[in-house]
Image (tube, rainbow, N blue to C red):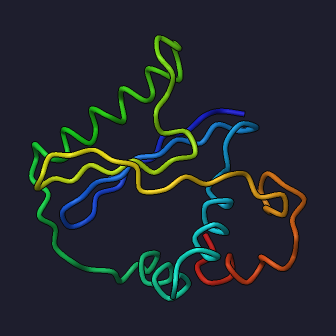
Amino acid sequence: GIPAVFLLSQHTRGRLFSVVPGESGCMDCLQIHDERSTDDFLPQYSALMSPARTGSTAALAPHIQRLVSFGVDEVVRLLTQYAPPFAVGRQVEVDYLSGTLGTVMDWQRETGCPTCGTHDPRYDYIFEVAPL
């Protein structure tokens, strides 16, 4: 029942999104959504979750600071309700090179989600790719 805000940084972009239990889709709903809407999602997900993953980034400290500031603002919005949160069930992207902010995608709660739904076994294969 506790909301969570997630941040991640990629090569030239950062993303943030929020999960509010009972209101938005959860992390597993996001995985189901991505599997249904992204070509070759499972190999990409497996590579992303691999402990052997290496790579470089163009993110500099000011880029990460900008991403974190949006994340902290989202947390404060969720806690104090001074303004509506802007990233609940939505991936918001910060483009480090252009300085722009935009929405990448939205996702909803999945009825068959194993975490917040009825656990439809037809989705089990998604979570076998990179078990936690």
Q: Position of residue 26 (x, y in %)?
A: 66, 51
Q: Position of residue 54 (x, y in %)?
A: 26, 80
**At 61% from the left edge and 54% from the top edge, which residue is drawn?**
107
- In the displayed structure image, the side of residue 79 where residue 99 appears, left or right: left
Q: Position of residue 64 (x, y in %)?
A: 20, 46
Q: Nearer the viewer, residue 98 or 25?
A: 98
The quarter of the picture where the C terminus appears is: bottom right
Q: Is residue 110 left or right of residue 16?
A: right
Relative to residue 35, is residue 110 drawn left or right? Answer: right
Residue beneath the point at 51% across and 22% down: 84
In x, y percent, where is residue 50? 44, 80
Count of numbered labels shown in the rendering:
0
The answer to whether 84 is drawn above or below residue 37 in the figure is above
Q: Residue at x 64, y 37 (%)?
A: 20
Q: Quadrant of the N terminus?
A: top right
| Residue drawn where x is 36% and y is 29% of the image | 72
